[in-house]
Image (cartoon, rainbow, N blue to C red):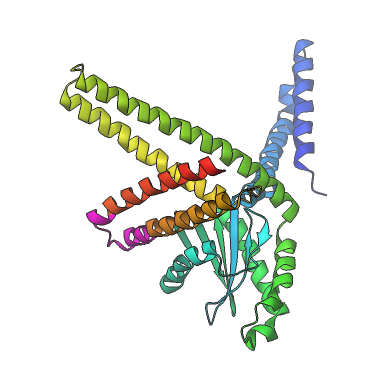
Amino acid sequence: MQMKPSLLIIGVAALAVSLLAAKLQGQDLVPSILPLLLVSLFGVGVAGIILWRNYVIPVKALASLENIIVDHLPSGVTLWAFDFVEMQRHTIIVSGFISAVKDFMVEMRKGELKKLETEFGTFIKEDGDFLTVTCITSGNTKAEEEWIRRRLQTFLRVAEIRHWNNLVNWVGDTSIFEESFFQIISSVINMNNTFKLQKQRISNIRRKKARLYAELKILDSEIDTIEAKFQNGKISEEEFEVRKTRIKNKYKRIREYYINTCLLLSRVTRKPVEKVEASREIEKIRRNFLKLKCEIDDLQLKKYEGTITPSDIKNKEKIQKKLTILIENLEKLM
């Protein structure tokens, strides 16, 4: 019978207490008990590995999930998608977000890639005979990625066996897969745990967003300060340019983190806005936000392909400035 990790740890702790008690009483039990101690320490090591593999890796993997998208392999049509951030199915398959990430999925198919890093997240893909399933995550270790891949492979195997005839003779009706695919993914991963982890993750991201925003304001203030010192002749032009460049580079890096954080939070369902005019303005900003983000990711694709130009890099900077303004306008309305 396999001993649980917690019991092994308790056993070693009890052994250590016994050794300490014996030492205090003047008894030297180390030579006789040393083999048992070594075996126990080995058991703790094994228990730690089991604990990490069975508990820590799944938790981290589940918390990283953002979207799962199931496509019909022969046609490339999306049959079903699930949003783990909002914990709901995409009833309208051609949603703004799905449309935005489809270009990356096409690139993966062309290049026969099983993984792609993008500003929308990390794309992990597995192919079956008739289905391809793509999971978008916030980034994973190798062990977490393998854990996710095993679940995707199980999903594909079950889905294709259950819907073999539908897939062989598919004529365009996606509704036949909706309930079934949700049941299959629910059998592959623990949806209750995923919901709790996602809720905690969103809470953490909101705190991160506030922290990043505060850091951006501090950097703005630092730039104003060194500009005032330069104008008052307290620092040289050379020192001014060096310090300004250093601060602006840091500002750009933090702003990119901030934009990505806002992109994720923009997908989280909020309380409805009472005023119709404000609600319309919010939706307009969100559409523009996604449009600009797609433009950035088009430039990112050029970077992967090695075709990006200095003009493209400058354009990316302009787009990020526009995104920052949109985010500030959205915050005023919410």
Seen as rendered, the residue at the extreme right is 1
Question: Toward the viewer: 322 or 242?
Answer: 322
Along the line of sight, the residue nearer the viewer: 36 or 1: 1
Residue 267 among those drawn in magenta: no
23 sits to left or right of 137 = right
Task: Tell me if residue 121 can be seen.
Answer: no
Q: Is residue 226 left or right of residue 35?
A: left
Q: Is residue 37 left or right of residue 315?
A: right
Q: Pick the residue in front: 73 or 283.
A: 283
Residue 216 location (% of width, % of height)? 41, 33
Q: Is residue 308 magenta?
A: yes
In the rendered image, the vertical position of residue 250 relative to residue 180, given as above or below:
above
Relative side of 257 to 8, left or right: left
Residue appearing at x 64%, y 62% in the figure: 82
What's the magenta region?
A: 298-312
Relative vertical location of residue 64 with respect to residue 99 in this rendering, above or below: above
Q: Nearer the viewer, residue 45 or 38?
A: 45
- Residue 193 is situated, as x and y percent measured from the top left of the image, at 73, 50
Determine which quarter of the picture holds residue 189: bottom right
Q: Residue at x 76, y 11 (%)?
A: 24
State the image quarter where residue 47 is shown.
Answer: top right
Question: Which quadrant would the C terminus be assigned to in this image?
Answer: top right
**Residue placed at 41% from the left, 56% from the top?**
292
Q: Residue 2 location, x and y as percent?
A: 79, 48
Q: In this rendering, does residue 210 appear at all?
A: yes
- Farthest bottom residue? 169
Q: Main secondary structure of the magenta part?
A: helix
